[in-house]
Image (tube, grey):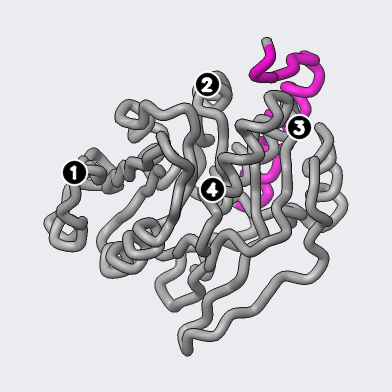
Amino acid sequence: MVTAVHGPHARFLPQAYASLCEQRLPQGWRWQWVVQEDGESGDVRPYVPSDPRVTFRQGRAGGPGVARTIALARADGAYVKVLDADDQLAPGVLARDLAVLEGDPRIGWVTSRVLDLLPDGTTVGFPGDPGEGPIERGTVLEQWKANDFLAPVHPASLCVRRELLLALGGWMALPASEDTGLLLALDAVSRGWFSAETGLLYRKWEGQVTGQPAHVERGEREARMAVVEARARALSRLRWSASAEQ
C-alpha cells in the first residue's frame, strides 16, 4: 500500500489506517503501508500510526506522483495498491484484488467501483460504471478521449503488479492527473479488471486537490491531457505486451 501525503491531508491518515486494518487477507499474505510525505514539514508524522507494518519517510516536495514513485523504494511486495491519504478502503477490497491478480497472469492491474464520501458521511456512486470483468487493452484510453478526459474507471482504486509499475516508471511527473497518466499507460500495455463491488471511498472536502481552481486551469489542463495521451499512444505503438506469464 502506497500513500502520498502532505500537511492538510494528514489528519485523515488515522481513518485510512483503520480501513486498512479491517482488511482480511488469505493465509500467508500480509500488507505493508508505505507513507511518503510530499515535503519535509512537522505536520504529518503525528498522524502516522505506530505499527511495524507502517513506514514513514519525508522528501522534498514534488507532487503526489513523485512522492508515490520514490516510495516504491520501500514497497517490496508483489503488488502495489494505491491509497490516497484522505480516502478509505472498502471492506474486502485487498482480498478481491489479490484474487484477480493471482488468478490470471494476463491481468496487470485492477480497479474497483468507487463511492464519493461526502462531508456529512453519506456516499454517492458514479453513473456508468463498467460491468464486472476484464478491461481489454486500449479501452480506457478511447473512452477517456471520447468523454472529455474522464476515465471509465477510477485511478485512485488501482492495484498493480509491482514489476509492471516499475517498468512504466511509476506515476507521471505532472502537477496533477499523474494517476490518470499511469492508468492510461497500464491500459496501453496490459489487460485490466474492474470489480463492480465497492473498493474505495473517495473523500470530497474543501481541501481536495482536484477541487482547487488550479486543477481546472485551461492551459495547464490541456497540457496535462496532451502528454498523458501522447504517452499512452506511444506505448500502444510499441506493441509491448505486459503479462506475468512472460
**Residue 174 placement (x, y as % from top left):** 51, 41
- Three-letter amino acid code of the residue under disc 2: Glu
Q: What span is in magenta? A: 221-245
- Left or right of 230, for residue 180: left
Distance from disc 1 to disc 2, alpha carbons, whole Å, reads: 24 Å
- Other residues around mark 4 within 10 Å, as few (<14) / some (14–19) / many (≥20): some
Q: Which residue is mark 2?
A: 163
Q: Are marks 4 and 3 in contact (CB under 8 Å)?
A: no
- Three-letter amino acid code of the residue under disc 4: Ala
**Residue 23 placement (x, y as % from top left):** 43, 56
Distance from disc 2 to disc 3, alpha carbons, whole Å, reads: 15 Å
- Three-letter amino acid code of the residue under disc 1: Pro
- Report the front residue among 166 and 224: 166
Q: Are marks 1 and 3 in contact (CB under 8 Å)?
A: no
Q: Which residue is mark 1?
A: 52
Q: Which residue is mark 4?
A: 95
Q: Which residue is mark 3?
A: 191
Distance from disc 4 to disc 2, alpha carbons, whole Å, reads: 20 Å
Look at discs 1 and 3 and give the one toward the viewer: 1
Look at discs 4 and 3 and give the one toward the viewer: 4
Distance from disc 4 to disc 1, alpha carbons, whole Å, reads: 21 Å
Q: Under tag 4, what secondary structure?
A: helix
- Report the front residue among 71 and 150: 71
Q: Under tag 3, what secondary structure?
A: strand
Q: Under tag 1, what secondary structure?
A: loop
Q: Residue furthest toward the bottom?
A: 120
